[in-house]
Amino acid sequence: MANPGNVAGGYKATLNNPNVSDEAKEHAQEMLDSGDFESAPSSSKHDDSMKNTGNVIGGYKATLNNPNVSDEAKEHAKEKLDELGA
């Protein structure tokens, strides 16, 4: 099954493409309005149980040292590191 986010992106692109017929744009809008494609299982949903804990910890540590990250994000990273015992 296709990734629902990619499907939605394709429909959105159809709406903005000047080379697409009005009929195709109407169909794309109907599909976006119905949201039927969103009910499919998605691998993009967060499932921490399948992530490599070492990589997760490394990502949070990188967040703490990144000057372009907001204070809220750094605080969240600190909380997650505490939860993970790192």
Image: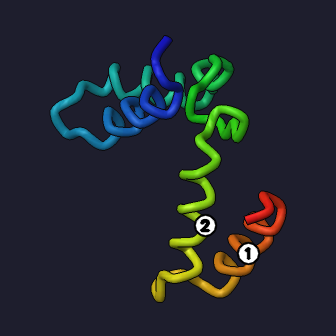
Asked if disc 1 and disc 2 are in contact, CB closer than 8 Å, the reply is yes
Q: Is residue 43 left or right of residue 19?
A: right
Q: Is residue 34 visible?
A: no
Q: Amino acid at mark 1?
A: Lys
Residue 84 is situated, as x and y percent measured from the top left of the image, at: 78, 58
Disc 2 marks a residue whose amino acid type is: Tyr
Q: From the viewer's perspective, is 85 left or right of 31?
A: right
Residue bearing mark 1: 78
Q: Residue at x 53, y 26 (%)?
A: 4
Q: Secondary structure at mark 2?
A: helix
Q: Residue at x 60, y 25 (%)?
A: 42
Q: CA distance from mark 1 to mark 2?
A: 7 Å
Q: Quadrant of the C terminus?
A: bottom right
Question: In front: 62, or 68?
Answer: 62
Q: Position of residue 10 (x, y in %)?
A: 37, 31
| Mark 1 residue element | helix
Residue 22 in sight here: yes
- Mark 1 neighbour class, 10 Å CA radius: few under 14, some 14 to 19, many 20 or more: some
Vertical relation: 61 (above or below) 66:
above
Q: Could you tell me residue 57's position as x and y percent?
A: 62, 59
Residue at numbered disc 2? 60
Q: Kindly identify the residue that appears in the image at 55 percent across and 62 percent down.
A: 58
Quarter occupied by residue 23: top left
Residue 85 drawn above or below residue 42 = below
Q: Position of residue 59 (x, y in %)?
A: 54, 62
Q: Residue furthest right?
A: 83
How would you rate the neighbour count of disc 2 (Cα within 10 Å): few for under 14, some for 14-19, many for 20 or more? many
